[in-house]
Image (tube, helix red, strand yellow):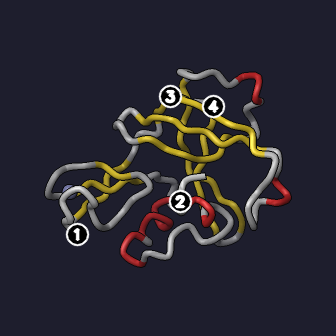
């Protein structure tokens, strides 16, 4: 699991105050990336500081949600906060904007249906009363 993903989902998504708007956007039904104003690189999940050019100037860019499945794996063991959810599917998908997303696949899609290259939709979801996340759904 990539570094940082252990806090994904049920646990607060990001503690970085600068990009906390991300959760607000999810609440509004939007999945947003950030774009570095200096070099134009797009980041998802959003980040307030660009590791390429060290600029801290960024702007919010909405993602269309259109993406293609690259690969996936079925998780039978879960980090803290996910124990009751196993098994679930984690996937890497590429958005049409070019950013790669690593996240869960909706339970509405069975593992048998998943094929690399298939179209998926990146969509915001409400996890519980005050936690928001995003997942890959059927387009
Ligand atoms: Zn940059």
- Residue drawn 77% across the image and 56% down it: 78
Mark drawn on residue 42:
none
Task: Look at mark 4 in the image and give the residue it sits on.
Answer: 138
Q: Is residue 78 left or right of residue 1?
A: right
How far is disc 3 from disc 2 in space, using C-alphas? 23 Å
User: Front-most of 129 and 2?
Assistant: 2
- Residue in front for this viewpoint, 136 or 69: 69
Earlier-in-chain disc, 4 versus 2? 2
Image quadrant in which the C terminus is located: top right
Q: Which residue is mark 1?
A: 56
Q: Nearer the viewer, mark 4 or mark 2?
A: 2
Counting the numbered discs, the total is 4
Categorize mark 1 by other alpha carbons within 10 Å: few (<14), some (14-19), many (20+): some
Q: Secondary structure at mark 1?
A: loop
x, y percent for residue 93: 51, 35
Mark 4 element type: loop
Residue 3, numbered circle: 2
- Look at 61% across and 39% down and name the residue there: 91
Left or right of 9, for residue 52: left
Which residue is drawn at the image coordinates 53% and 41% (left, top)?
A: 122
Q: x and y percent of residue 45 in the render?
A: 44, 55
> Whole-Å distance between the Cαs marked 1 and 2?
21 Å
Provide the residue designation for mark 3. 68
| Ligand 1 within 8 angstroms of badge 2 C-beta | no
The answer for how far apart the CA atoms under marks 3 and 1 are is 30 Å
Q: Farthest residue toward the left?
A: 38
């Amino acid at each position: 699991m990539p570094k940082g993903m252990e806090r994904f989902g049920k646990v607060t998504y990001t503690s970085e105050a600068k990009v906390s708007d991300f959760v607000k956007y999810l609440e509004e039904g939007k999945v947003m990336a950030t774009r570095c104003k200096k070099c134009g690189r797009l980041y998802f999940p959003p980040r307030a500081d660009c590791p390429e050019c060290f600029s801290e100037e960024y702007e919010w860019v909405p993602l269309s949600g259109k993406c293609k499945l690259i690969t996936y794996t079925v998780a039978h063991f879960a980090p803290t906060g996910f124990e009751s959810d196993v098994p679930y599917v984690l996937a890497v998908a590429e958005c049409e904007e070019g950013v790669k997303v690593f996240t869960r696949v909706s339970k509405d899609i069975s593992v048998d249906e998943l094929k690399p290259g298939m179209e998926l939709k990146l969509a915001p979801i409400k996890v519980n009363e005050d936690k928001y996340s995003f997942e890959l759904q059927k387009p």
